[in-house]
């Protein structure tokens, strides 16, 4: 039997070598002549100077697998108990080779893309054009909140509600009475704007101090969200767990 008499380049591993041997011998990967492939593979690792123990163990393990498959090919084929079909000893190896080949192709595509990108010259961004575009683009939630998450804001709101609950006279609050809804978002927006004008910055909790009921607290909070959205105010937090501060917007 002829042995592949060629000088092979370095390989990343045993699967890489097997694919190269299959390619050079024009072998159908779905119908591998396991005997010849095993002989070519053993010839290669015999003449390759394997110094690294980990690398050597990988190649030897694959050689053992090939020899095992080769020996099974000489024996009567086993049958699947469920389907009663003959089991091909090469099947598992073929599946692994095909999977490895797919990853190899994807890696090559990524490499080609990287090489192509290195040859492309990109023009520096036109700041004026970007700013012009940004004017007509709705800000994202992250941009609006400027580092504070919605969860942080909601937690602060819940804390205000808890404080309001603790201050409520539970006995008098049980008395039934007819009340008129006195709170609306527009009034609260004006109220918050006036506070910001009078103070360069104000604590988030401060704007709820005049609220006399949960309904008013909720309306005030909605007014805060609306002002954040329209960029009339900004909310900032210097460090985690610090108080949330409201300042004038852009």
Image (cartoon, rainbow, N blue to C red):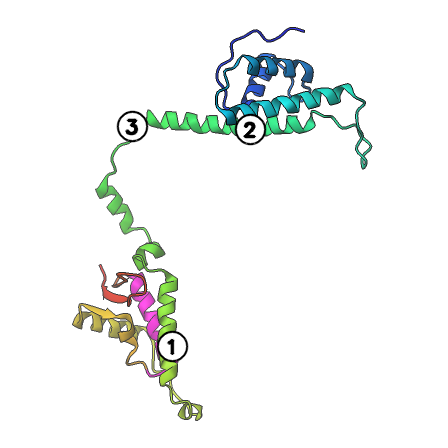
Crowdedness of circle 3 by 10 Å Cα count: few (<14), some, many (20+)? few
Q: Is residue 118 magenta?
A: no
Q: Quadrant of residue 22?
A: top right
Q: Position of residue 11 (x, y in %)?
A: 50, 20
> Residue at image x 76%, y 28%?
87
Q: Quadrant of the N terminus?
A: top right
The numbered disc on residue 140 is none
In the visual, does 123 lie left or right of 200?
right
Sequence order check, earlier mark of 2 and 1: 2
The one nearer the camera, 56 or 233, is 56
- Say whether residue 221 is magenta: yes
The residue tagged 2 is 102
Front-lying residue, 28 or 66: 66
Please tell me in which quadrant of the rendered image residue 31 appears. Answer: top right
Of labels 2 and 3, earlier in sequence is 2
Marks 2 and 3, Cα distance to the nearest angstrom?
31 Å
Instruction: Give the residues drawn in magenta, as a range.
Output: 212-230
Residue 33, visible in the rendered structure: no
- SS state under label 1: helix
**Image point (36%, 60%), residue name:** 149
**Closest to the observer, 184 or 38:** 38
**Residue pointed to by mark 3:** 121
Distance from label 3 to label 1 (Cα)? 56 Å
Of pointers 3 and 1, the one earlier in the residue sequence: 3
- In front of the other: label 2 or label 3? 2
Q: Are marks 2 and 3 in contact (CB under 8 Å)?
A: no
The label shown at residue 161 is: 1
């Amino acid at each position: 039997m002829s042995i592949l008499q060629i000088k092979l380049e370095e390989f990343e591993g045993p699967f890489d070598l097997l694919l190269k041997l299959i390619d050079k011998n024009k072998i159908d990967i779905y119908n591998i002549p396991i005997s010849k492939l095993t002989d070519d593979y053993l010839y290669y690792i015999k003449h390759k100077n394997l110094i690294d123990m980990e690398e050597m163990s990988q190649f030897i393990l694959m050689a053992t697998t090939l020899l095992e498959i080769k020996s099974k090919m000489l024996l009567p084929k086993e049958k699947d108990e469920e389907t009663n079909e003959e089991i091909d000893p090469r099947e598992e190896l073929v599946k692994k080779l095909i999977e490895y080949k797919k990853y190899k192709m994807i890696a090559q595509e990524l490499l080609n893309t990287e090489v192509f990108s290195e040859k492309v010259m990109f023009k520096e961004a036109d700041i004026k054009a970007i700013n012009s575009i940004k004017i007509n683009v709705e800000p994202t939630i992250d941009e609006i909140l400027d580092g504070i998450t919605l969860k942080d804001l909601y937690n602060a709101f819940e804390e205000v509600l808890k404080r309001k609950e603790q201050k409520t006279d539970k006995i008098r609050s049980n008395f039934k009475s007819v009340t008129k809804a006195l709170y609306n978002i527009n009034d609260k927006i004006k109220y918050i704007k006036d506070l910001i004008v009078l103070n360069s910055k104000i604590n988030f909790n401060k704007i709820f101090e005049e609220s006399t009921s949960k309904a008013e607290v909720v309306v005030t909070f909605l007014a805060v969200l609306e002002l954040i959205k329209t960029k009339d105010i900004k909310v900032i937090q210097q460090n985690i767990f610090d108080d949330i501060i409201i300042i004038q917007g852009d």
